[in-house]
Image: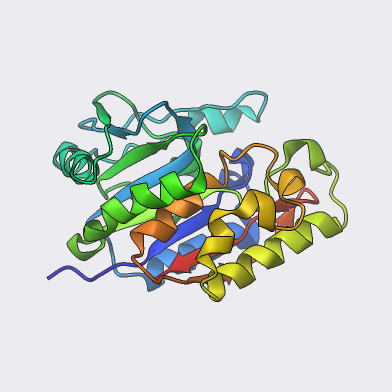
Amino acid sequence: MAAVLPTLFLSHGAPTLSLDPGATGAFWQKLAQELPRPGAVLCVSAHWMSEEPLVSAPERNETIHDFYGFPEPLYRMSYPAPGAPALAERVAGLLAGAGIANGIDRSRGLDHGAWVPLRLMYPAADIPTIQLSIQPDRDALWHDRLGAALAPLRSDGVLVLASGGAVHNLRGLARQGGPVPAWAQEFDEWLAAALAEGRKAELLDWRARAPHAREAQPTPDHFLPLFVALGAAGAGARGERLFQGFTLGSLSMAAFRFA
């Protein structure tokens, strides 16, 4: 019988983390070693957006280099994990059963929000992996509902891995490094406390109730995957911060486990 897996939210940072993993990459590697080995991965990445939920279902994943102006070696990296068409059909069925219209994309591969962490966590690229898109025009409650529909996957040995950024304001980055701004630190700490204490109503209303919400998340795309992971962990789930830290000044690399 497959182990019941937690769900995860990882802040994936810049693609260059694949070249210089640092403390974040070391944490990802350790995390994968500590978790039960999943039979498959469902990744919810900030970098796949659509009007309605889409599930990827290729036989084998192409590696999408969805970034520009980075060092050339990044564009040679690949993560050819097998796809999981049968799992994609199951995900589509679970969403439909919850009254959520959705579709299947049989050609889409893995964007860097998926393959950057997975390449360090499971470097053999031998775990079947699919993705689920987010809907940036929908709110946190919608994404929590998506996650709730997927909760049965945890008992089937599927790792629901959400990938985005706990604090993600590209205009607020310090490209040469520097101290963490107070607004970024305060939002990061509010998030960790609200998740640990199960303050779900506050989390779902984060734009109005979180400190410095507009500065920490000018657009919601890197934050919405967190709510899918939270919803998939089941009613009453809480989040434990497993890793914290900042890069480029204000870019949070926080990671959370939900159960």
Q: Position of residue 168 (x, y in %)?
A: 68, 45
Res 231 quadrant in image: bottom left
Q: Position of residue 108 (x, y in %)?
A: 33, 26
Q: Position of residue 109 (x, y in %)?
A: 35, 30
Q: Can residue 218 be seen in this view?
A: yes
Which quadrant: the N terminus? bottom left
How is the protein colored in the picture? rainbow
Decide: is 61 above or below 38. above
Q: Is residue 215 left or right of residue 139?
A: right
Res 34 quadrant in image: bottom left
- State the residue at coordinates (23%, 57%): 153
Give whichever of 252, 115 is nearer the camera. Answer: 252
Which quadrant: the C terminus? bottom left
- State the residue at coordinates (32%, 55%): 148
Decide: is 243 above or below 231. below
Q: Is residue 91 left or right of residue 137?
A: left
Residue at the farthest bottom position = 197
Q: In this view, does 23 lie to the left or right of 115?
A: right
